Image (cartoon, rainbow, N blue to C red):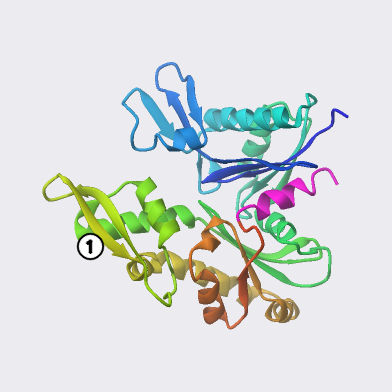
């Protein structure tokens, strides 16, 4: 009765925790705020994210994961432990959990080891590593054990994974260190270049989620944006349209499409035939940007669609396969 199975999607932008029998119990930004001198934790998750760009000099607010891998080991370990403790309290169990944690398909053995060690140090009894495309496919409702080709395009915060899966394993894949965070950076650069206005990352993310598009909408939408005028140094406001975000996102989007093309080109023809029949599945937060499915379909000639619960697919896949 004290056994507990946990799946963790350790993402660059968000950490999701799935408890078997309970579902997703934690969905928080991968952000930590701590006091610089004492290293005392002040906030984790959403509370810490609200401090981004607003903290005084004695408080550091960081994202301890960059491009899907650990950039700050000790802070990541403390963040994972806090989330696991919170998950276990919600389940009201006190045993040591078995944990399956997801990593991008392109990480090295050293990077995998760092993740495993960090999770073990939180008190786990057993730790499994699962590659994100496989977890995303399972979480999207695909039976990956069949001799049938399935293509997953998983666009997270720091990495985009494109993989062809068959018989329970990855046949061909490519991991691109370019994803949702790069869309935010692209907006910051575009607005600075076009309007001489400086905005922060939280504002850029809000633009991306509200009007961000990679494909023309039937009716363009607009949004008022506030920032600092780089000429006068004073606050200023502008109106940005969804059409402008297409232009801002163009470079990042083209690299993701190139990766999709490359993986299709090197995949066995029989599996490509399967993919052409059943379509390309998009998952991850980045896949929710307006029109990405239409753009992939237009670019490849293969039907593309956003899988069910795209944001949660990876953690659901991990959580439902723990310790099988």
Q: Which residue is mark 1?
A: 194
Is 288 situated above or below 24?
below
- Residue located at (75% from left, 46% from top): 319
Q: Secondary structure at mark 1?
A: helix
Q: Mark 1: few, some, or many residues within 10 Å (few <14, many ≥20)?
A: few
Does residue 320 appear to the left or right of 261 in the view shown? right
Q: Position of residue 61 (x, y in %)?
A: 42, 32
Q: As drawn, is 259 to the left or to the right of 169?
A: left
- The residue that appears at 67% across and 33% down in the rendered structure is 119
The one of 71 and 52 positioned closer to us in this rendering: 52
Q: Is residue 36 magenta?
A: no
Q: Outermost residue, right direction?
A: 1
Task: Say which residue appears at 45% left-offset and 38% top-offset.
Answer: 49
Residue pushed farthest left? 232
* On screen, residue 219 above or below 28: below
- 91 left or right, relative to 14: right
Q: Position of residue 221 (x, y in %)?
A: 37, 68
Q: Name the image quarter holding residue 53.
A: top left
Is residue 318 covered in magenta? yes
Left of 55 or right of it: where is 82?
right
- The image quadrant where one finds the N terminus is top right
Vertical arrangement, residue 124 with respect to residue 209, above or below: above
Image spot of residue 42 (x, y percent): 47, 24
Residue numbers of the magenta segment: 311-324
Comparing 268 with 8, the one in front is: 8
Q: Give percent across and percent down for residue 312.
A: 64, 52
């Amino acid at each position: 009765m004290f056994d507990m199975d946990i799946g963790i999607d350790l993402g660059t932008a968000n950490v999701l925790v799935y408890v078997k029998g309970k579902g997703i119990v934690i969905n928080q930004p991968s952000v930590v705020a701590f006091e610089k001198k004492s290293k005392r934790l002040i906030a984790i998750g959403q509370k810490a994210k609200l401090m981004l760009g607003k903290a005084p000099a004695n408080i550091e607010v960081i994202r301890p994961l960059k491009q899907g891998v650990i950039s700050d080991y000790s802070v990541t370990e403390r963040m994972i432990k806090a989330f696991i403790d919170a998950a276990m309290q919600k389940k009201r169990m006190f045993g040591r959990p078995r944990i399956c944690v997801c990593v991008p398909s392109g990480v090295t053995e050293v990077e995998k080891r760092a993740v495993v060690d960090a999770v073990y140090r939180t008190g786990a009894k057993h730790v499994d590593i699962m590659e994100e495309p496989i977890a995303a496919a399972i979480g999207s409702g695909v039976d990956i054990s069949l001799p049938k080709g399935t293509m997953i395009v998983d666009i997270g915060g720091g990495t985009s994974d494109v993989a062809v899966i068959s018989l329970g394993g990855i046949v061909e894949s490519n991991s691109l260190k370019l994803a949702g965070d790069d869309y935010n950076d692209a907006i910051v650069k575009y607005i600075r270049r076009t309007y001489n206005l400086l905005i922060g990352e939280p504002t850029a993310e809000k633009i991306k989620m509200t009007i961000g598009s990679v494909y023309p909408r039937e009716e363009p939408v607009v949004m008022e944006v506030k920032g600092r005028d780089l000429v006068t140094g004073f606050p200023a406001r502008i109106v940005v349209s969804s059409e402008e975000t297409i232009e801002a996102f163009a470079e990042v989007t083209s690299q993701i499409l190139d990766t999709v093309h490359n993986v299709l080109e090197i995949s066995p023809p029989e599996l490509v035939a399967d993919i052409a029949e059943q379509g390309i599945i998009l998952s991850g937060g980045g896949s929710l940007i307006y029109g990405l499915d239409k753009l992939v379909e237009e670019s490849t000639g293969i039907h593309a669609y956003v899988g069910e619960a795209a944001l949660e697919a990876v953690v659901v896949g991990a959580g439902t396969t723990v310790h099988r």
